[in-house]
Amino acid sequence: MLTLKRLPQSVLLALYGGAAFASLIPTAFAQDTAPAPSTTPVAAGTPAAAAAGQDSGIQSVSIVGSRRVGNFSAIDTPVPVDTISMTKASEQGGQFDLAQVLNNVSPSFNSTRQTGADGADLVDSAALRGLGSDQTLVLVNGKRRHTTALVNLFGARNRGNTGTDMNAIPVMAIRNVQVLRDGAAAQYGSDAIAGVINIELKKSLGCEMVTGFGQYTEGDGDNYLASAYCGVALGGGVLGITGEYYDRGRSNRAEEGNPRIIGDTKSQNSTVYLNGEFPLGAGKLYFTAGLQNRDASSAAWAREGLGSEDIPSRNSAAMYPNGFVPFINGDIDDRFGSVGYRWQLGEWNADLSQTLGYNSMRYTIANTLNASIANLDLSRGGRGVSARTFDAGGFSFRQATTNLDVSRFYPGVAQGMNLAFGLEHRRENYKIRAGEPGSYIDADGVGVGGNAGSQGFPGFQPGDQTDSKRHSSAAYLDVETDLGERFKLQTALRHERYSDFGSTTTGKLAGAYRVNPAMLLRGSASTGFRAPSLQQVYFSSTFTDFVSGQPLDVVLAPNGGPVANAAGIPQLKDEQSKSYTLGLTWSPNAATSLTADLYRINIDDRIVLSGRFDADNYPALGATLQRLGVGQAQFFVNSVDTKTQGLDLTLSHRANLGRGKLNSFLALNFSQTEVTGVHAPSALRGFEDVLLSERERLFIEEGAPRRKATLGFDHSLDKLETALRIVHFGPQTLGTFSGPPVPNQVYKARTSADLSFTWAFTSKTRLTVGGTNIFNVKPSEQDPNETDNGFKYESVQFGLNGAAWFARLAHRF
């Protein structure tokens, strides 16, 4: 039975108070006709979900989670879907990238910028319902989007996960974002355990442009944005073209006298996206193409100068007598393309498509040195120097997906039945490229003088290189039936076979019952799976971590490699899940909408990044590690069962207020993840506390806040529009490096607020000024020796940068 245990009193008060509040204030955005563009999440239980943000008659309404033919209202969907229009976010929003926009609008969505987390600083990973980023499937125009080549190894979020880089798509290019809050692996395949995010791109006529500037109130982190979209009539259809340049400056919240740099990474994004649809023969040809290049730079731990133990181990007196901060520079390329043809064969609708995705990251470590080379140079009578910049190698991920989807609606079966089936074939390739020798060699010998490799990020070694491939094939059957005027039933079945670990079959059953014209009851039950990513199977690296400020070389051993085999780590297999939802939608009138959905997600054999094994806690592995010259080793392993349960609630209202209009919404998510079992491989039995330490367990259970709420108001009067958004982040508890009995890190609940004013000079030109986190709220302070990033603020909840102000100028042509 789905239950929510021990809901705190503050949560219950929020539920009752929010409902009472919305019933008293005459506001909303659920309506019968298309509303003003908004970043407000429109519940799928409202007519507005189907109407929101329509750009032109050439587009058809598509709701993720359903393959029903033709336009239909989302008011009858048996599973919860939020439709979030991006028009206002692109023209007036205080957040300049998609991950931050969604993090401040959708309570079930979580994304926090990391700092001091190496490559994870360069890519903002995202997730739903407190689960990992690789347990959320992302689609673009209904087609599977590739994940990044990066595996998150550090930071408080998504450790050991791959995920989709949401910020590779400019907000200006997006019509709306649909968030399916339900397990959907039986419909869409691997990764859809927590839910599905479908990004629908624009293809409307007309042109628009936006320029923006933002800065933290402490005077750093300058953001410059120039974005433009133009939709042109071409060949009887529409071609939408989006170009964007986004320059995000570095911020630093380290205290005076602290040589480290703690804050946002420096990032420059250049992006172009095309999206079009054209009549061809008896059907329509459509395509999407996107390209982004990102030059990003994060700051590693500082190395100290003269008089410190860092000379000669991590520094050279001749090169950096006052110490230095290495920079991990990443050149990230992201490419996405999809081309397809839709046509009719009698009563059947067919869609054949090919989708390609590619992501690569190349590391250059700057303002650094290889201390072993410098120490060897000094021992030979030189000054004691090495190069200051190294090519540290990198990795790439490529994915090609072929889909054939066929569907037909039978009006004579029951009250109507939609039958859909299809095939999918996917090929994937993951590569690691070694860096130049100076980025990883130990020139003066193991344990002698200077440490090996480029400080900040040792390069990938020849032994880390891989060129790994796999393919999978799938077949699915999806049936939606109106059994009567009030009852809808949805069933789905999918079989998928992978070349590297076998096959799996998943199923889904969902239903909706309309109690009366205003109320709909709905529920679902499904099984799901997530295949281990190639990144998790084959990633290999030796890096330097800092425990209580002390350096330690750690090897992350690939599955099937000599270290993993010596430790008895079995071959990775798929995660398996069972998901349940039970909820209702209530729309008493065209101005009010309420949705409430309980959910539970059980995941067995969850793939996690293990704790660190060494000669002390696993003596049998010690000799192997000593031969490799490393102090600790960790692995990816199927070893954890988890249970996630919670509640999603959305409440919206709209009305006239004097001569103006006021739209408001309240959206809440309560989520609790619990590790219910730890299954150590036979060779590691008795070492469960190392396999999953309390620190790593807490990263799984509380990597995201256990509650999150967004309360928004949008008031328009003549030419002035005022928007206020209040975002509440619940508490989190994270572990410490030292572990028990050292107390855990407790982050108290925090509430942030954004405020903006928009003046419409004309119907086509608007100027917006405002602030984000206007009360300069920051996370709870901790002992820097026990945090993951070695700073008093961890990168949790909404980040650590504080208040910012922004301005945007938008013009439509």
Image: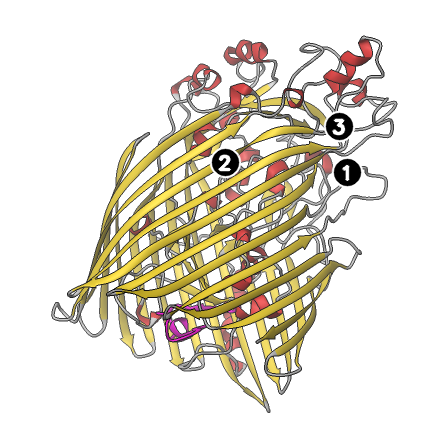
Q: Is residue 531 above or below residue 719?
A: above
Which residue occupies 43% across, 64% down? 82
Where is residue 287 shown, x and y percent of the image? Answer: 39, 57
Residue 239 coordinates in the image, percent (x, y): 44, 65
Q: Which mark is residue 785?
A: none
Query: Residue at 75% across / 20% down in the picture?
Result: 371
Q: Between disc 1 and disc 3, whose residue precedes?
A: 1
**CA separation in Å, label 2 and label 1:** 30 Å
Judge the density around disc 3: few (<14), some (14-19), many (≥20) Cα neighbours within 10 Å.
some
Mark found first going from the N terminus, 2 or 1: 1
Give the image's coloring scheme.
secondary structure
In what quadrant of the picture does the C terminus appear? Answer: bottom right
* Residue 42 magenta: yes
Judging by the rendered image, the residue that carries numbered circle 3 is: 388
User: Residue furthest toward the left?
Assistant: 412
Which of disc 2 and disc 3 is earlier in sequence?
3
Name the amino acid type tagged 2. Answer: Ser
Cα distance between the residues tagged 3 and 2:
25 Å
**Tag 3: residue type?**
Arg
**Extreme residue toward the bottom, this view:** 659
Question: Would you name the residue on which mark 1 appears?
Answer: 260
The residue stretch that appears in magenta: 39-60
Left or right of 649, for residue 367:
right
- Relative to 440, is 422 on the left or the right? left
Q: CA distance from mark 1 to mark 3?
A: 18 Å
Q: Nearer the viewer, residue 416 or 658?
A: 416
In this view, the mark in front (1 or 3): 3
